[in-house]
Image: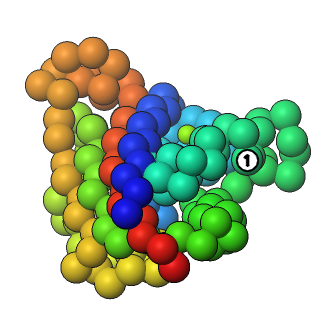
Amino acid sequence: MRVGYGYDLHRLAPGRDLWLGGIRIDYDRGLVGHSDADVLVHAVADALLGAAALGDIGQHFPEHDGRWRDLKGSALMERVMGLIAEKKFKPVNVDCVIHAEKPKLSQYRDAIRKSIADMARLPAESVNVKFKTNEGLDAVGRGEAISASAVALLSDA
Ligand code: MG
């Protein structure tokens, strides 16, 4: 058994779609980034890579490499799953937190959970998604950014 941790943060800005865990969220702003800026997928992917001691998504999908521009979360996760499978690992469970002041996300909980489970080839019962505000403090609390953190457990495939 191997545990890994991942964290990510992206800025919110108008004129962008908001993607969290592969689900499009209805909001007037979205996360800014080279890829689709899906902060939850990035945290989960880094947790999976971390558990396999495979570095981080910045190494595997460098921004200077134009191939990864607008990379979808689902495509990124497919590649990460391939990398951990090469190391003969498979996910056991994933637990994650989305830190967002706005929008309210509880109505998306089941969809995000199912989406992350599908990407990690797990049953929904093996994925947990939590939502936290930052009590109005810092960039997340002011609604200028959304961050996510995740832990993942891997076992031998
Ligand atoms: Mg990111």
Q: Quadrant of residue 148?
A: top left
Residue 132 visible in the current orientation: yes
- Work out whether residue 94 or residue 24 is closer to the camera in this orientation and state it: 94
Query: Number of marks in the image?
Result: 1
Q: Is mark 1 within 8 Å of ligand 1?
A: no
Instruction: Examine the rendered structure and indicate whether residue 134 appears above or below residue 65.
Output: above
Q: Position of residue 143 (x, y in %)?
A: 31, 28
Instruction: Single out the residue that lies furthest toward the top.
Output: 138
Per the image, the residue denoted by label 1 is 60
Q: Amino acid at mark 1?
A: His
Q: Position of residue 31 (x, y in %)?
A: 50, 40
Answer with the quadrant where ligand 1 appears in the image. top right
- Work out whether residue 102 or residue 140 is closer to the camera in this orientation and state it: 140
Residue 29 visible in the current orientation: no
Mark 1 closeness class: few <14, some 14–19, many ≥20 residues within 10 Å: some
Residue at (78% x, 50% y) in the render = 68
Q: Position of residue 119 (x, y in %)?
A: 50, 73
Residue at (48% x, 64% y) in the render = 22
- Work out whether residue 46 or residue 147 is closer to the camera in this orientation and state it: 46
Q: Quadrant of residue 65?
A: top right
As drawn, is 125 to the left or to the right of 85?
A: left
As drawn, is 14 to the left or to the right of 154?
A: right
Instruction: Examine the rendered structure and indicate whether residue 72 appears above or below residue 100.
Output: below
Protein image colouring: rainbow
Q: Position of residue 32 (x, y in %)?
A: 57, 36
